[in-house]
Image: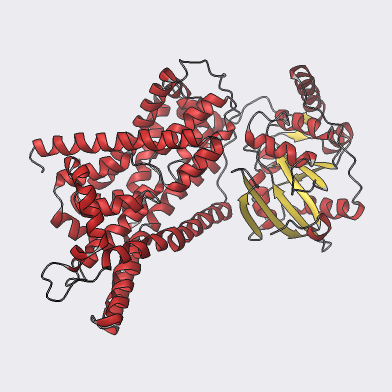
């Protein structure tokens, strides 16, 4: 679809600001549900665009640009922001107005960015966000003096409170009514000396227009004394992660049971309406064993995935993520990773794709590449269906030490192994590929603590649920149709005595790869599941559901977990878990690695080393477990 012209789009406004200034919360408050997210053409940087109507009934097209500290653009994210501001990105008209969003509790870096933006020549206004927190802390800002010194409008905003954007909307009306022509930009990238001069000017503005009380916020000081403590902070971080993985099992179970029961009831209904013979029998098999057993077997894990995302969103909004990154800098530095790699790696718990994209905050290319190579080792949400299925089938639901769930403890252990393997491979890569090349020092602006906004968290959860459902309705559905066809065709001949699936293409494929998989304890059914599982990890669970449903066609009511516990040994189950700790990435992640690195070679390298690790881990696990009597 072609881009609309600036006139068709209405008044165009872009939000610019430092990371953690509340810019995205302000965007959500202004646009509500009238927003969409996509990638900028040609890159994997996310764009958020929304529409709103001002009190004067003017239509505004609002863009939330990636956070930046400067227009010098030392990372891909910052380059996008610079190009949009300067009107240098094809298909993106230059904004009619820039709104620089600054954290009212800490204006130094925000004001420096305002001074840089002034040099672009684009109409500009400054929005002092989180002004309510600043006033609560006794910070007084002379808006008139600041506006006069800067020579541009200054308004206040509170993204999390009704009516907190009224002054900003009024300025949209005022600016759109004038809508001056934007002159061509005289802007050139500032050098280090110019940036220092701009920072001195920003400090002068803070001195003349802002009065900060002598005492630091007591709550922030008390919390930071704990979460940033070299020992106590690590304990807090581990406790948060442990709680997260316990919740994935404990909180999601009632909703998962409801979804699972609904799909089982749907399968029984389909079985009662359609006969077993003829073409209608084939249709019955497709609906029961392909769609319901396959896609339903993946959708049942949606509650657990949303709980994981909920924790990540809450921790990010609360202000803990940046502190965890600061805390982990020394540990990650010892493994050859930059301190800023912590947030991309933590994001990879949800999905490796946004985690890899988040590496753009790392300035040094080799630091960024090292993080990209190990991000897929972090346990993404696509592994949750696999882990949950095997843990529920083979690990007893009992308490350890009277209060810790054993299943949640095993899940925590799997995540811990993923984290340690990522650190270990980074250590290897930096010493074999880059010979300990020195990294840039880690500098990070710690945001203030603030309560997450329910609306922002709800929007974030809905966007991720929609993405998962879209994935289930496209990739997983398509792969299930393929798996069902391969498992059902050709039909068994007259008088056949073996299960129908043993005459199918899937059986032929599975038995062909089984000799390679036998040393790690995998049977032909697992071989059939692993191949499409490389398109999307969740497909492995759906594929197993389809294969075992067709194989046990006389017992459609048997659920997958029961089927596996009856057919697999504990050694095979543990090897399967070990395989998926290191399992080669899905096709979409490999495509993102290629785009982010600009090289097919690094994508194939990632696939290859993870395949070797997966096979080696499964082999050692299976052989050891078998030796100990679990085979």
- Tell me: residue 22, above or below residue 361: below
Q: Is residue 279 above or below residue 155?
A: below
- Residue 630 is situated, as x and y percent measured from the top left of the image, at 10, 42
Residue 609 appearing in the image: yes
Q: Please state the horizontal and vertical placement of residue 519, each as a whole percent of the image.
A: 17, 40
Name the foreground residue: 352 vs 475.
475
- Dividing the image into 4 quarters, which one contains the N terminus? bottom right
Residue drawn where x is 77% and y is 49% of the image? 13
User: Which residue is situated farthest in the left direction here?
Assistant: 629
Q: Quadrant of residue 553?
A: bottom left
Tell me if residue 54 can be seen: no
Marks counted in the figure total 0
Does residue 163 appear to the left or right of 587 in the view shown?
right
Left or right of 445? Residue 253 is left
> Which quadrant, please, contains the C terminus?
top left
In-front residue for pair 206/463: 463
Name above or below for residue 530 compared with residue 474: above
- Please state which of residues 546 and 421 is positioned toward the viewer in this rendering: 546
The residue positioned 57% from the left and 41% from the top of the image is 450
Residue at the location (29% across, 48% down)?
387
Q: How is the image coloured?
A: secondary structure
Q: Is residue 285 left or right of residue 303?
A: left
The residue drawn where x is 71% and y is 49% is 63
Give the image quarter of residue 440.
Answer: top right
- Give the percent coordinates (x, y) of residue 445: 61, 29
| Residue 414: image location, x then y, percent | 30, 39
């Amino acid at each position: 679809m072609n881009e609309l012209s600036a006139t068709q789009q209405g008044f165009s406004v872009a939000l610019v600001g430092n990371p953690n200034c509340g810019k995205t919360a302000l965007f959500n408050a202004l646009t509500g549900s009238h927003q969409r997210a996509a990638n900028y053409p040609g890159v994997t940087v996310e764009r958020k665009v929304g529409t709103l109507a001002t009190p004067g009934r003017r239509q505004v097209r609002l863009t939330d640009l990636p956070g930046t500290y400067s227009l010098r653009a030392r990372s891909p994210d910052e380059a996008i922001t610079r190009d949009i501001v300067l009107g240098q990105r094809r298909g993106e008209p230059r904004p009619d107005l820039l709104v620089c969003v600054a954290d009212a509790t800490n204006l130094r870096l925000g004001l420096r960015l305002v001074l840089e933006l002034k040099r672009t020549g684009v109409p500009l206004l400054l929005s002092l966000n989180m002004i309510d927190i600043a006033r609560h802390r006794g910070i007084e800002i002379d808006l008139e003096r600041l506006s006069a010194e800067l020579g541009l409008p200054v308004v206040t905003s509170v993204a999390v409170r009704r009516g907190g954007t009224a002054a900003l909307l009024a300025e949209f009306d005022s600016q759109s009514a004038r809508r001056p022509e934007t002159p061509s930009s005289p802007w050139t990238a500032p050098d280090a000396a110019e940036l220092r001069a701009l920072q001195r000017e920003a400090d002068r503005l803070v001195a003349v227009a802002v009065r900060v009380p002598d005492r630091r916020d007591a709550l922030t000081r008390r919390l930071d004394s704990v979460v940033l403590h070299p020992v106590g902070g690590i304990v807090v971080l581990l406790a948060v992660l442990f709680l997260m993985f316990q919740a994935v099992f404990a909180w999601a179970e009632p909703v998962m049971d409801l979804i699972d029961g609904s799909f089982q009831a749907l399968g029984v209904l389909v079985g009662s309406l359609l006969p077993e013979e003829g073409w209608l029998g084939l249709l019955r098999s497709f609906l029961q064993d392909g769609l319901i057993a396959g896609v339903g077997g993946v959708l049942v894990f949606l509650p657990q995935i949303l709980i994981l995302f909920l924790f990540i969103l809450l921790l990010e909004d609360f202000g803990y993520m940046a502190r965890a990154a600061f805390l982990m800098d020394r540990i990650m530095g010892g493994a050859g990773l930059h301190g800023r790699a912590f947030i991309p790696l933590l994001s990879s718990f949800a999905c490796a794709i946004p985690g890899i994209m988040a590496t753009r905050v790392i300035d040094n290319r080799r630091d960024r590449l090292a993080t990209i190579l190990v991000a897929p080792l972090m346990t993404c949400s696509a592994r949750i269906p696999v882990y949950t299925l095997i843990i529920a089938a083979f690990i007893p639901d009992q308490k350890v030490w009277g209060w810790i769930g054993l299943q949640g403890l095993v899940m925590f252990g799997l995540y811990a192994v993923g984290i340690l393997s990522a650190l270990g491979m980074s250590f290897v890569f930096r010493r074999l590929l880059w010979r300990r090349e020195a990294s840039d020092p880690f500098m990070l602006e710690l945001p203030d603590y603030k309560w997450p906004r329910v609306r922002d968290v709800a929007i974030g959860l809905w966007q991720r649920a929609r993405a998962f459902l879209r994935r289930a309705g496209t990739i997983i559905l398509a792969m299930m149709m393929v798996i069902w066809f391969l498992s059902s065709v050709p039909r068994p001949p007259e008088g056949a005595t073996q299960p129908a699936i043993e005459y199918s293409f899937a059986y032929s494929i599975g038995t062909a790869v089984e000799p390679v998989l036998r040393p790690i304890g995998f049977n032909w059914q697992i071989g059939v599941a692993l191949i499409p599982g490389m398109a999307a990890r969740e497909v492995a669970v759906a594929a197993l559901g389809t294969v075992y449903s067709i194989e046990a066609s006389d017992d459609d009511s048997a659920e997958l977990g029961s089927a596996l516990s009856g057919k697999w040994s504990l050694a095979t189950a543990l090897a399967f878990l070990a395989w998926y700790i290191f399992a080669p990435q899905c096709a979409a992640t490999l495509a993102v690695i290629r785009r982010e690195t600009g090289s097919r070679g690094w994508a194939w390298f990632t696939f290859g080393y993870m395949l070797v690790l997966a096979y080696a881990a499964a082999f050692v696990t299976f052989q050891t477990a078998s030796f100990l009597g679990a085979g």
